[in-house]
Image: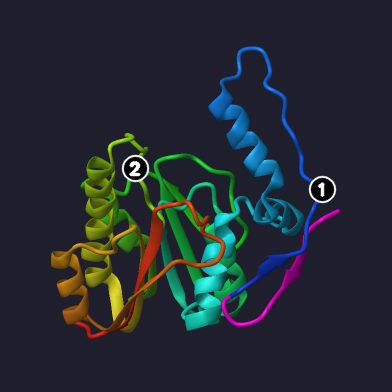
Amino acid sequence: MAANKQGGKGGTRFTGRAKAVRVKTARGRKIGSTLWLERQLNDPYVQEAKRQGYRSRAAFKLREMDDDLRFLKPGARVVDLGCAPGGWTQVAVERVKPEKGGQVIGIDITAIDPIAGAEILHHDFMADDAPDLLRAKLGGPTDVVLSDMAAAASGHPPTDHARIMALAEAAHAFAREVLRPGGVYVAKVLRGGTERGLLEQLKRDFEKVKHIKPPASRADSAEMYVVATGFRGG
C-alpha cells in the first residue's frame, strides 16, 4: 500500500504507513549497500518520484521550495548547475513552460538522457570555459540560477563542507554575471548554513537571503539550501 500524500504550501508531504520492504543481504553486497537499498525502497518520496516520472526524489525539494517562494514563473529563464540525474530540470521545465517562452539549460559532468523542453550540456561547470558555454546558450539575462551541485562525500565533515562551499561560491559568481535585476539564486549548502564571507556577499547582492531545509530533504541529511531573491543587479 502506497503512502498517502498531502499538498498545500511548502509542497507535497506524505502521511500514513506503507508496508515496509525488507532487503536481505545478498552475497557480495555490503551491509551499508543493503541498508541504503532498503531505505530507498521504503522512501515515499522515491516511490512518488517514480510514479510521477521524476528522475530523482530531489525533484520534490525544488518543488517544495518553489511552492513556498514562487520563483519558477512561466516564461522565466533558468540555469540548472549540476543537473544530473535531471529531477530539478524536469521541475523547472514544468513550471517555466518553454512552450510559453521559458528556457531551461542544465549542465553536468555526468551525461544524462535528454529532457523535453530543456537543453542539457555534458560539461564540467567548474571548467574554465563552462560559464562562456552557458552564456552562449542563453537568450539573454537569466531569472533563476539553481545549483544542487555536491562533491563526493569524503567522510571528513570539514573537507566536505569546504568542497560544497566552493561549489556554492562558484555558482554565486556565475549568478552575478548572468542574473537580471530581481533574479534568484538557489544553492545547496550543509548544516550550519552559508559561510560568513558568502553570506555577506549574498546580502549585498540580493534583497532577501534565507536558509531552507525542504520537507523532502531527509532529516538525517546535513544538506540545506540557501535561497537569495531580488538580485540588485550590477
Q: Is residue 177 left or right of residue 100?
A: left
In the depicted structure, whether residue 111 falls above or below residue 61: above
Q: Nearer the viewer, residue 168 or 113?
A: 168
Q: Residue 129: horizontal and vertical position, in percent?
A: 24, 49
Which residue is disc 2 drawn over? 151
What residue appears at the point 21 percent right and 64 percent down from the top-left corner? 173
5 in magenta: yes
Does residue 24 lie above or below 40 as drawn?
Answer: above
Residue 137, how many percent across, how many down? 38, 61
User: From this viewpoint, is residue 208 visible?
Assistant: yes
In the current view of this chain or complex, which residue is farthest to the right? 1
**Residue bounds of the magenta highlight:** 1-10
Within 10 Å of disc 2 (Cα), the crowding (few <14, some 14-19, many 20+) is few
Q: Main secondary structure of the magenta part?
A: loop
Question: Residue 201 or 162: which is nearer the viewer?
Answer: 162
Callout 1, which amino acid?
Lys
**Residue highlighted by disc 1:** 19
Amino acid carrying mark 2 in the image: Ala
Residue placed furthest toward the top: 27
Task: Name the residue located 76 percent from the left edge and 39 percent from the top edge.
Answer: 21
